[in-house]
């Protein structure tokens, strides 16, 4: 998030040019691997040396996130049998058709386009297919850990059902977890999020909490022991051609960072 980087560096620049401002040790890191699926797994937390942190990767002014999805991805490989269509009766097994049948097992009301807030989903992100072979790629999401486990179990049962129907060698599942809900780790240290919201209010910003329908580097860091809620950058329409951020919103985000530092000095006095 280049806007978030600019906002953080705006705060650093202000501190450098105003040495009279009291603050504790400030650690800054930029993690480049979130959007390619690696999150902040390569950040050396011990070397970074922070007690807690914030990511600036959120949406509109006032947004605070300390809840996010539990996430897994899955790939389902299908082996068909190609036969000339003129003589295919009783012999052809179309991987394309079997893929469509497999997709039909999933509830249509539990897709990204039909869910919001705390509602989880299954999402087929890609379907590569020809008669002889197909591969379907899924992401599985839910805020609730129990429901998340149930969703993964449903995926396994759906594959097993197709294996029983067409043969165990016709369907193969590979599934792995990606990240988990940071709320489970934040529960005992809510001062981190509460201080950020207090800073916003002192700046005339009304904070609002959203259950993030995605993941952040903060989720990966929180599960590794560095509690890291996510705060607004001021941006809108993310991941689309109409993505934008007002300069005034970026200025607010920089002011928020400085105010958080001020509040922690005030609290420790």
Image (spheres, rainbow, N blue to C red):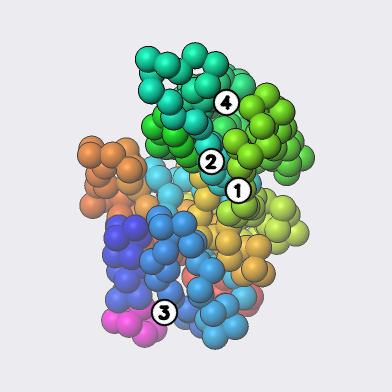
Query: What is the spatial separation of the Cα atoms under label 3 and label 2, in whole angstroms?
Result: 59 Å
Q: Residue at x 70, y 58 (%)?
A: 185
Who comes first in sequence, dot 4 or dot 2?
2
Q: Is residue 33 left or right of residue 172?
A: left
Who comes first in sequence, dot 1 or dot 2?
2
Q: Residues within 10 Å of mark 3 (few under 14, many from 20)?
A: few
Q: Residue at x 52, y 50 (%)?
A: 215
Q: Are marks 1 and 2 in contact (CB under 8 Å)?
A: yes
Of labels 3 and 1, the one closer to you: 1
Residue 233's tag is none
Q: Position of residue 145 (x, y in %)?
A: 73, 44
Magenta-tinted stretch: 15-21
Give SS at disc 2: strand
Q: Is residue 105 above or below residue 169?
A: above
Mark 2 — residue? 77
Residue 139 seen in render: no
Query: What is the spatial separation of the Cα atoms under label 3 and label 1, in whole angstroms?
Result: 53 Å
Who comes first in sequence, dot 3 or dot 1?
3
Query: What is the spatial separation of the Cα atoms under label 3 and label 4, in whole angstroms?
Result: 61 Å
Q: Are marks 3 and 4 in contact (CB under 8 Å)?
A: no
Who comes first in sequence, dot 3 or dot 4?
3
| Numbered label tally | 4
Q: Is residue 20 above or below residue 210?
A: below
Residue 174's tag is 1
Mark 4 — residue? 102
**17 inside magenta stretch:** yes
Give SS at disc 1: strand
Query: What is the spatial separation of the Cα atoms under label 1 and label 4, in whole angstroms?
Result: 15 Å
Q: Please identify the residue farthest to the front as the structure is shown.
A: 87
Q: Quadrant of residue 170?
A: top right
Q: Quadrant of residue 253?
A: bottom left
């Amino acid at each position: 998030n280049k806007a978030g980087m600019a906002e953080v560096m705006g705060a650093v620049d202000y501190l450098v040019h105003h040495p009279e401002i009291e603050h504790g040790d400030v650690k800054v890191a930029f993690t480049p691997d979130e959007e390619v699926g690696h999150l902040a797994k390569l950040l050396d937390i011990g070397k970074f040396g922070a007690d807690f942190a914030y990511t600036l990767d959120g949406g509109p002014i006032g947004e605070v996130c300390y809840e996010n999805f539990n996430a897994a991805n899955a790939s389902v490989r299908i082996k068909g049998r190609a036969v000339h269509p003129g003589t295919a009766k009783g012999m052809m097994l179309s991987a394309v058709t079997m893929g469509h049948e497999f997709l039909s097992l999933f509830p249509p009301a539990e897709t990204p386009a039909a869910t919001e807030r705390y509602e989880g989903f299954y999402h087929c992100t890609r379907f590569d297919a020809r008669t002889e072979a197909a591969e379907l790629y899924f992401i599985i999401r839910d805020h609730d850990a129990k429901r998340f486990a149930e969703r993964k179990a449903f995926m396994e049962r759906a594959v097993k059902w197709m294996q029983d129907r067409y043969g165990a060698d016709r369907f193969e599942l590979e599934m792995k977890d990606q990240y988990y809900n940071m709320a489970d780790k934040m529960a005992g240290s809510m001062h981190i999020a509460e201080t950020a919201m207090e800073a916003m209010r002192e700046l005339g910003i009304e904070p609002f909490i959203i259950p993030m329908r995605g993941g952040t580097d903060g989720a990966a860091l929180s599960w590794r022991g560095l509690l890291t809620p996510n705060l607004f950058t001021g941006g809108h329409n993310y991941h689309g051609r109409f993505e934008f951020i007002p300069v005034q919103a970026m200025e607010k985000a920089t002011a928020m960072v400085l105010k958080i530092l001020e509040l922690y000095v005030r609290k420790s006095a």
